[in-house]
Image (cartoon, grey):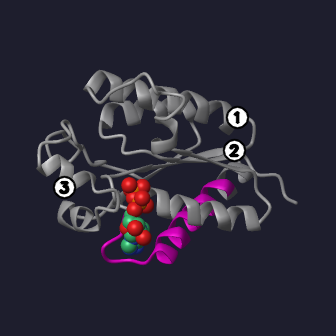
Amino acid sequence: METVEGCTVWFTGLSGSGKTTISRALEKELRLRGHKVEVLDGDLIRKNLTKDLGFSKEDRDANIRRIGFVAQLLTRNGVIVLVAAISPYRKVREEVRQLIGNFIEVYVNAPLSVCEQRDMKGLYQKARDGKIKHFTGIDDPYEPPLCCEIECRTDQETVEQSVAKVLLTWQQKTRQHRDK
Ligand code: ADP
C-alpha cells in the first residue's frame, strides 16, 4: 500500500446540508482503498468531547477548536480526518486551517429552504416554533466560505458526485505533497 500523508477534509454547512452523508460515503470509499480514516462528526463530538459546551458564539468556537486540535493530532499521524461540523464562523475555520496545515475545506451547500424541507431530525420545525434557540440559519448566523477548495451543491448533485469531487481534490493535493 502506498503511504499517504495525513490530511483533514473539513465539511462545513447548515444542518441537513449533507455533511454527514457525504463524509460517511467518502469514509467508505477511502477505507476500501486501504486508507486510515477517522470521521469526527459534530453531533457525536457534542455528546462526548464537547458535552459541556452550548451554542453561544464562544462555545461554538471552542467546539471547533477542540475538534481542530484532535484533527491535527490525527493528521500528523497519517490519518485522513473527515470533519462534519456546521462550523458557522469563518474566522475559527481559518484558525483550524492554519493549525492543521494539510487541509481541504468543503462547503456543503444547499439552500436553507431545502435543508428545512429535509429536516430529518425535526430541528428546523422546533427552531421555527421557538422551542430551540440559536439554531444556525434560523436565528443564528452561518458565514459561508469566501474561498474554499470545494463546494458541493447537494440540491443539484448526487452524493456520488460530491464524493468524486472531494476524492479528486484530495488526490491532487496528495500528489503535489509527494512531488514537493
Ligand atoms: P448534515 O450532516 O449536514 O446535518 P445529513 O448528512 O445528516 O446533513 O443529512 C442530509 C440529508 O440530505 C440526508 O437525509 C441525505 O440523504 C439527504 N441528501 C439528499 N441529497 C443529498 C446529496 N446530494 N448530498 C448529501 N445529502 C443528500
Q: Amino acid at mark 2?
A: Gly
Which badge, 1 or 3, comes first in the chain's sequence? 1
Q: Is residue 146 magenta?
A: no
Magenta-tinted stretch = 150-174
Please report the residue visible at 46 percent of the width from the left and 27 percent of the height from the top.
51
**Labels 1 and 2: the sequence-earlier one:** 2
Q: Is residue 129 visible?
A: yes
Q: Secondary structure at mark 3?
A: helix
Q: CA distance from mark 1 to mark 2?
A: 6 Å
The span from disc 3 to disc 2 (Cα, nearest Å) is: 39 Å
Q: Position of residue 143 (x, y in %)?
A: 24, 43
Q: Nearer the viewer, mark 3 or mark 2?
A: 3
Q: Are marks 1 and 2 in contact (CB under 8 Å)?
A: yes
Which corner quadrant of the figure contains ligand 1?
Answer: bottom left
| Percent of width and height locating residue 170 | 60, 59
Q: Point out which mark residue 125 bears.
A: 3
Count how many numbered circles sit on residues in the image: 3
Q: Nearer the viewer, residue 145 or 54?
A: 54
* Residue to which mark 2 is pinned: 6
Q: Main secondary structure of the magenta part?
A: helix
Residue that label 1 marks: 76
Q: Amino acid at mark 1?
A: Arg
Q: Residues within 10 Å of mark 1 (few under 14, many from 20)?
A: some
**Residue farthest along the right direction in this orientation:** 1
Query: Which-is-in-front pick, marks 1 and 3?
Result: 3
Numbered disc 2: secondary structure: loop
Q: Residues within 10 Å of mark 3 (few under 14, many from 20)?
A: some
Does residue 107 appear in the picture of this structure?
Answer: no
Does residue 41 appear to the left or right of 36 in the view shown?
Answer: left
| Nearer-the-camera pick, 3 or 114 | 114
Which secondary structure lies at badge 1? Answer: loop
